[in-house]
Image (tube, rainbow, N blue to C red):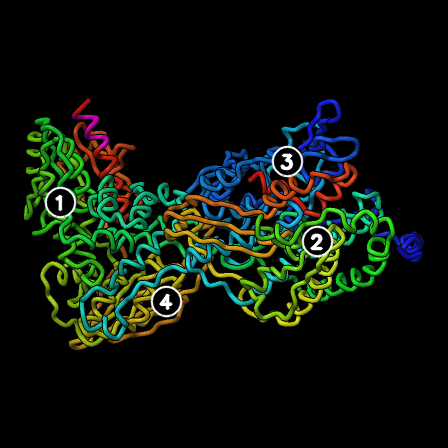
Amino acid sequence: MKFTNIISPFLAWGRAAKKADTVAFPSADRPGAPRYRGFHINDLEKCIGCGRCEEICQNAALDMTPTPLTQFKEGDTGLRPRVDYGRCCWCALCVDVCSTGSLGMTNEYLWSSVDADEFIYTPGLEAKPWDDSSRGYRQAQDILGWAGGARREMPVLPPDERIKTFDEVVMGFIEEDAVAEAARCIQCGLCVSACPAHMHIPEYLLAIAERRFRDAVEIFYQNNPLPEMCGKVCTRRCEMVCALGHQGEPIAIRWLKRFATERFDSLAEVMRMWERKAPTGKQVAVIGAGPAGLTAAYYLALAGHDVEVFDADRKGGGVTRSGIPMYRLPDQSLDKQMEVFKNAGVTLRFGQTIDQSRFVSLCSDFDAVFIAVGLTGALRLRIEGEDLGGVESALDLLARVNLEDDASPVGERVVVIGGGNVAMDASRVARRLGAQVVLSYRRRVQDMPADDEEIEEAKEEGIEFRTQTIPLRIESRGSKLLYLYGNAEMIPDQKGGRPRPRLMEGTEHELEVDRVFVAVGQAPDLGFLPKEISDQLKVDWGKIVVDADQFTGVPGIFAGGDITPGRDDAISAIADGLRAVRGIRRLLEG
Amino acid sequence: MRTDPQKTVRLFFGPQHPGVTGNMSVELWVEGDEVTKGISRVGYLHRGFEKLMERRLWIQNFPLVCRMCVPETDVNEACYAEALELLAGIDVPVRARWLRALVLELARLGVNLMSLGGQGGTIGLGTAAQWGITYRDFVLDLLEELSGGRIYHMFILPGGVRRDIPSGFFSRVETVLETIEERLPEFDRLLFDNAVFQTRTQGIGVIRPEWVDELGLVGPMARACGFARDVRQDDAYEIYDQLAFDVVTETGGDIFARALVRRRDIALSIDLIRQIMKRTPDGPVAVQLPNLTRWRIPAGEVYAKVESSRGEYGYYVVSDGGLRPRRVHVRGPSYVHGVTLLERMLVGTNIADVSNLMVSLTICPPEIDR
């Protein structure tokens, strides 16, 4: 041992003269680091209550609870996370997986209270000093999947190919892509409440993700007897509210439904195991073999009732067959789905027009009648020249092409008036029939009721959009037509609706075309109802008003689909059909 | 073994004893001030980690594993992440690998400072303990800035690291490294040049070289006996094969030699951190993981290991292709050091040297009580 070894430790006293490394608490504040994982904050407005945070929490520290400030609405469960700081381990997985990015953690870490229950709190609801803190841990790069990864690309025909053919634009997923896409689902179930038919979306996505495709189809059929049609053309309310859509792209729920049904050449084969209940001896007449009528017929038949469906067309499907072009919904697909109805014991009677006398006899022959005739009339432009030859309803064009396979040319140049899905369909059909198409719409593109995807595809196919154009009149010029229109300016709607178009006086343009197709909406036609019945019905804007069970108020008569108020799309019609089943079964089975 | 009841006193040392490393105890049979027999009593920290992991989703175990070792949490995260990556076939971005090495070295630096200080603390040199903790706190400040947590960093994630470094982070790391480097000579004078420290550590708690292979000793315990064993070099993980360094060894095998290995490991960590900071490439820091609640990892089994401050630390993970691990087994070095080795070494030890010995073995009880 050396002498220096006895002296050297005492040199540590030198430190005493230097500045201390510690800070004095509480006089000196020591804030957490800028990305410190401290107390939670939550933007209640932004949060949709999907419950992803609750699901990922390994300590069950988060609990989705109702709050007085939020309520259930489409795309929002109304629930908000409540944190139990007795359980929280501050790992911030909840922040990283938050589908909206509303949840965060501040760099605050001091909170004392004598009441232990205070530490179970709902961020954003109870005011805290750190509510406005901008520091702390926030969502950054998406590695933990708040956006669910990239949506699988759906292969489509290139635009220049598809204008030559009525083949389907969408080519469908391959199995690997479908499974990967379905596996993105976080099972929040927001889609279920948004879907009018409340299909069991998380369940069937799980089935697809686990390659249980037969199970998936069976789940579809629990509340949708036309899944392949919906898989191709549904307006997909589900995807609009998908939690992953907030910061990424929603799951391709529609395409996955299509994928699962297309795996099977025969859906009737898959659904064979569905046993019908013992016959009840009750009879139900369904007028109209569209989505609403078929849905009601299917589930009523399964319940053991004798169901006869009457339709004026030669095949079932209603407007989904006559109005939706082949490149979106091929005939073969509908034919394949129609087989299931036959298997379920539904009697389908096509080519049957129901008039007043026939309706009366139906009412007396059957225990219940379900009116699902859809919208059979077209709205008119109410301008001069509308009745000229060559001016036609877009629906007539679609029906001619779809039902009669009439692919005769419609001329070199046509104009389609309107901005809804029918206008898009008619434009794209006319394009496939070889015409140059101009689309004339009163409002702007962003105001169009048509699906964004359809608008995009129409543009790709070379449809010329002339927006903010108001039809003035149509004149005849030789063998051609002259479409005259004025420009519109947008004025805000007093009631907060879409801005309204107003004609700018003095503007007038002309367009020489071969044909004019009018797609400004459809109208109900209740002419088949005898007066004594229609007098008893409550009619609003030409549509039959019904209750929550689709009951019209006239004993034994139910109505649904586009003929009743509400959204005019296939899935809403299916939902109407399901409600009618509930109402009719209550009536027949007590 | 002499256990004459007339002469022997049975003494419970810990779990509530400042000289015990963490939450464990040893039961001692003492004659005079000499220990004649010692048994490690563990179980106070048993939280059933390995079993818990079998009922949690793969990702939910990521905030859990770090709790296996409080002073050096990152080795658990690294092992778990690496095991999952091997099983799932995830290719980790290069930058993430460098950042992981940075975090692992920072953590090693911090824990070595603490245990070196602790070594002084057990023999009454409280100043060293305070300093060690203070310097470690500088490192913890850095880790807090990087990860958002001081102790449980939860930074090394399967697939990469959780965040990129904040801007200017490397310069702040450098400042801390310089501060520590500047103060280390003072630290040395307080410990290694100190007659008290020398007297209480030299020739005490000697590990015989033949025990190393017999018991499976790793880390500083083996290196202080002249075995150049270091996973960083023997079976390089992350980017350690791209770093230039020599494994630190000493030959004494006593407490002093182990302290010296730690002291030199501090210098090595500082050097490695500088190398890492100089060479970390740009690029992404993580890959996109699949849907976490639906994440199935292909069936298989894998052993992933890293070099912790206490030696080889390994995770044996078995997947049956499900949403959760089938089995996770943690190989903590303290299991050997804290039970088999300690019980052997306690015999013949002076009672005043028991905690001295335990600290020099850097026993981390949660690794034993998984």
In the rendering, at what x and y percent does residue A250 appear?
A: 39, 54
Name the residue tied to disc 2: B253
Please tell me whether mark 2 or mark 3 is closer to you in this view: 2
Q: Amino acid at mark 1?
A: Val
Label 3, secondary structure: give it: strand
In the rendering, at what x and y percent does residue B59 appear?
A: 48, 48
Q: Residue A507 sits in which quadrant? A: bottom left
Q: CA distance from mark 2 to mark 4?
A: 87 Å
**Chain on which label 1 sits:** A
Q: Amino acid at mark 3?
A: Ser
For the N terminus of chain A, give its image quadrant: bottom right
For the C terminus of chain A, give its image quadrant: top left
Q: Confirm whether circles 4 and 1 share one chain.
A: yes
Name the residue tied to disc 1: A340
Q: CA distance from mark 2 to mark 3?
A: 22 Å
Q: Residue at image x 30%, y 67%?
A: A458
